[in-house]
Image (cartoon, rainbow, N blue to C red):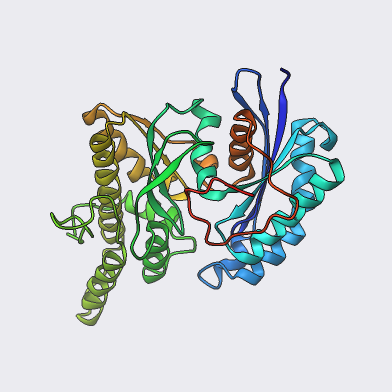
Amino acid sequence: MTDRLILGIESSCDETGVGIVRLGPDGVLELLADEVASSVEEHARFGGVVPEVASRAHLEAMVPTMRRAVEKAGIELSDVHSIAVTAGPGLAGALLVGVSAAKAYAAALDKPLYGVNHLAGHVAADTLQHGPLPERCVALLVSGGHSQLLLVEGLAERITEIGSTVDDAAGEAYDKVARLLDLPYPGGPPIDRLAKRGNGCAIAFPRGLTGPRDAKYDFSFSGLKTSVARWVEKRERAGEEIPLADVAASFQEAVADVLTMKAVRACKDLGVDTLVISGGVAANSRLSGLAAERCAEAGIELRVPRPRLCTDNGAMIAALGAHLVAAGAKPSPLDLSTVPGLPVGTVQIF
């Protein structure tokens, strides 16, 4: 069996991503290209992603991003074996741009098409850096719209959600707290930088859903966000100076504490010895640092992709597509639809 080139297209939110991976006969993946065009600056003045702006940006960026990826990989489009595209979850209009482009390329090149799950793609991204996943692992997926604990029993076979956020995702809480502290959007990086100058133990912010009767693997960050707002408002009314670095550090400590505690608990309960952390918030320094400490104490292997692979990109979609191709999965039809609310357990759309 010869090498096969898999093209991945991602357009679920505000990044237009095109990735190309080589699938070897032994199942090992090699990343050849990972090109991303972000429209985050266009959304920053609104304090969040505007769906219509994102869709227009994808339309404008898709072909130039594709050209850069093909040039970077040193291939011709006709060399591609298969095309994978994010079909959900995500913004309806944004998904439609990516899926429409993938259909056009698949039809024009007469290549098989795989409509895949964006969330499963985040887990697959780790295989581009650390190689194949073990037969069973727990994945902590933390991004702007998702905070989930997953039991992964094969990327092309079975992914089961065992826990999720009941309100705000961790990334959403970061964005809202950043706005409260007058920090730029998206909120994750500026809070992380500011927190390094503060004391994470300075303020005892609450840890949501950590009581003995609470769901063992679910998350809640809405109360934490509100607690930060009330703490800041109280001191502003009293005319006191706000210790921004301590607020950022204490908020970040609360988020990382809950995420890592529940992830390690899930590994222990399920008898799993590998934890994968993926998604945009996985690039957070305190989250990865605390996870490393707790995994080392529990004898759990921790795998965190490099920051570029944590955020939305086409490489992760190409990687997931490669796993489906290697498993002999049937291609999706050319008339496949987007599914904005696609559950993580549905890895591929038919």
Name the residue rendered at 61%, 35% in the picture: 324
The quadrant of the picture occupied by the N terminus is top right
Could you tell whether 186 is left or right of 327 in the image?
left
Q: Compared with residue 210, is residue 328 higher up or lower down, i.e. above or below?
A: above
Name the residue rendered at 30%, 56% in the picture: 219
In front here: 51 or 288?
A: 51
In front here: 321 or 14?
A: 321
Residue 118 lies, in percent from the top left, at 55, 49
Q: Compared with residue 221, is residue 17 higher up or lower down, i.e. above or below?
A: above
In front here: 14 or 152?
A: 152
Among the 4 quarters of the image, the one containing residue 58: bottom right
Name the residue rendered at 79%, 45% in the picture: 106
Name the residue rendered at 22%, 58% in the picture: 209
In front here: 152 or 316?
A: 152
Residue 175 lies, in percent from the top left, at 43, 64
Could you tell whether 181 is left or right of 239 in the image?
right
